[in-house]
Amino acid sequence: MTAYILRRLLQTAVVILLLSYFCYLLMTLMPGDPVDEMIMANPEITSADIDRLRALHGLDQPVWVRYWNWASSIASGDLGYSRTYRVPVTDILGPRLLNTFVLAGAALLVAVIVAIPLGVWAALRKNSTADYVINLFAFAGISVPSFWIAIVLILVFAVYIPIFPAGGTGSIAFDMTPWESFVDRLKYLVLPVLSLSFLSIGTYVRYTRAAMLESMGNDYIRTARAKGLGWPRIYLMHGFRNALIPLITVTALSFSTLFSGAIITETVFAYQGVGQLVFESIQSNDFNVAMVAFMISVSMVLLMNLIADLLYGVADPRISYA
Amino acid sequence: MPESPPQEAVVKVENLQTTFHTRIGPVRAVDGVSYAIGKGETLGIVGESGCGKSVTAFSLMRLIEPPGEVTGGAVWLGQENILEASETRMRELRGSRMAIIFQEPMTAFNPVLTIGYQMDEQISRHLGVSRQESRERAIDMLSLVGIPSPRERYANYPHQLSGGMRQRAMIAMALSCDPEFLIADEPTTALDVTIQGQILELIQSLQERLSMAVQFITHDLGVISEISDRVLVMYAGRTCEVAPTEILMSAPRHPYTSALIRSIPKFGQRVSRLPAIEGSVPSLYELPSGCAFQNRCPNAGQRCRDSHPPLTEMASGHQVACFHPVDR
């Protein structure tokens, strides 16, 4: 088991390294570099100045040399400096990461708590009215674009019935007790969480329903019935216990996509998260911020993959990593 | 109506009818089957795939699911007609007074729970004993069915056991609450021949020991002749012939039974081609009026096409549903 985890971590590290080079290449393919921004900001700049600035920032070097410089400073713990915010990347990224983590985590939690019972219910009442209604909503959740649901939520719960703020991450106030500021943060979280979870609820409902139907069709369900067990035990210990195996993978993997995919939701709600930061930094050629954020997204996907595989082994005794 | 069973019947099936409501229309998978099984007796039920033998078993356990439904008859377990019992009552009976062993030991166990957990579930459900007691009982049962090192096997998951061992564990689980009636639904079909023999012997010895009534379902006449006291031959959902095993094997009266027995290869006999029954089983959707076997029967006459032959007593305990039984 330990050997397996170590081997997987090593593989993960190699993949992250390769992907970091690839991301770096993609960034250099973008039109413009930081010096272009300086040119636009200062019309009196001379071409000698430009060359000097390029050399100063190392932008005249070949890509692989620049990559090497970047990677070695990252490896030494220096994440660089944000040109837009004029602070170290760590200072700007840290709080943003935490915000997104809270948003994505809460959305995942809500989605799982709502979707799994609905999916199980739909499977057990297959082809009933309840099943059709649940499926209708699931497909709506899958098909509706995320900005639309976000705007509808703002209209309903911030404009017509103003009970939640329309956007932002927290109120600007200095005289709040820790409890008040916690409640305040929660208020700002409700709408983005609802809008983000609405999208994944549909997917989870469909997955849960399918997994549960598959599990309930197995021979061991018949055995459980022939043993005289009651329905709750048959549904939970035999049906759902087996349906859980595919669900673990789906949930763990989608956590990483929630993480990087919250850009639209964060933008609509002006929520100070990573998604929004990445979007801004790409637009403004803020290389260092974008690269670190990319690397975090990549690592999240790979890490969640690893966690999914490990959980899989816990849920299914037939799989062993010895 | 069924003849009086040899001893007091543990289970008595009267005119059982099970119907599947399909899109094309209702299909009678089991149509008017009656039999009784006494204490310590084994009734073999033989027939081709789809003749209704497994559906009969599931009907008895009330495990038929929609679109299927038991549409008529009675199943007496002791003094109780279980077709009229509530679902709650059925849950009390299943696994305790009546148990079933399935065909596929590979898939009949839940793969993510240990053998022990799955046995405990049943034992504590029906006997209401403590965890420790149910564990001891489960381990005793595992050793009773000849599983080596039962303590370790108790903690194993199904995939850690071989097919034969899994079927033994299945038998141990089925018998864990002392059922008086056991249904074995092709319990050896999925196993290889050497294991088959062991499992048959095991079921036989356990039956003698626990004096259960056993309904043994198979399509293998060789197996049935080894294990059962009486045999019931089914064809297209109906009974063709019921007889004590030796009589059925040596002097079958129904043309179908007779053809079935002729098609078993005999030891030491050289034939260029085994006799087979011409034609195929009619689809249950388009059963002919009259005898279902008429299209494959050498003896069939006009009467067979017009009406269905009733089950008639030919000799004591030997009933045949045929207008033109085979003469010996």
Image (cartoon, rainbow, N blue to C red):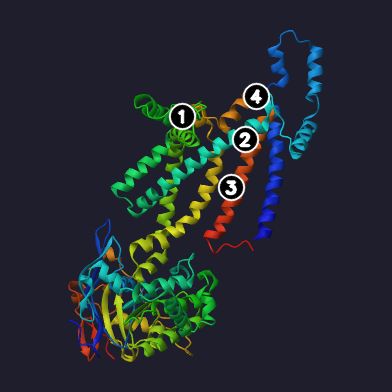
The chain containing the residue under callout 1 comes to A
What amino acid type is highlighted by mark number 3? Met
Are the residues at dot 2 and dot 4 in contact (C-beta closer than 8 Å)? no
Residue B5 seen anywhere in this rendered image of the structure: yes
The residue where tag 2 is placed is A94
Nearest to viewer (mark 2 / mark 3) = 2
- Characterize the local packing of mark 4: few (<14), some (14-19) or many (20 or more) Cα atoms within 10 angstroms: few
Label 1, label 2: how far apart the Cα atoms are: 26 Å
Compared with residue A197, is residue B190 higher up or lower down, i.e. above or below? Answer: below
Task: Tell if the residue under mark 2 belongs to the same chain as the one under mark 3.
Answer: yes
Foreground residue among B53 and A93: A93
> At numbered mark 1, what does the secondary structure look like: helix, strand or loop?
helix
Task: Tell if the residue under mark 1 belongs to the same chain as the one under mark 2.
Answer: yes
Are the residues at dot 3 and dot 1 in contact (C-beta closer than 8 Å)? no
Image spot of residue A50 (x, y percent): 78, 15
> Mark number for residue B198?
none
> Mark number for residue A304?
3
Label 2, label 3: how far apart the Cα atoms are: 20 Å
The chain containing the residue under callout 2 comes to A
> At numbered mark 2, what does the secondary structure look like: helix, strand or loop?
helix
Are the residues at dot 2 and dot 3 in contact (C-beta closer than 8 Å)? no
Are the residues at dot 1 and dot 2 in contact (C-beta closer than 8 Å)? no
Q: Residue at x 59, y 49 (%)?
A: A305
What amino acid type is highlighted by mark number 1? Phe
1 or 4: tag closer to the N-terminus: 4
| Quarter of the rendering occupied by the N terminus of chain A | bottom right
2 or 3: tag closer to the N-terminus: 2
Task: Tell if the residue under mark 2 belongs to the same chain as the one under mark 4.
Answer: yes
The residue where tag 1 is placed is A147
1 or 2: tag closer to the N-terminus: 2
Label 3, label 4: how far apart the Cα atoms are: 30 Å
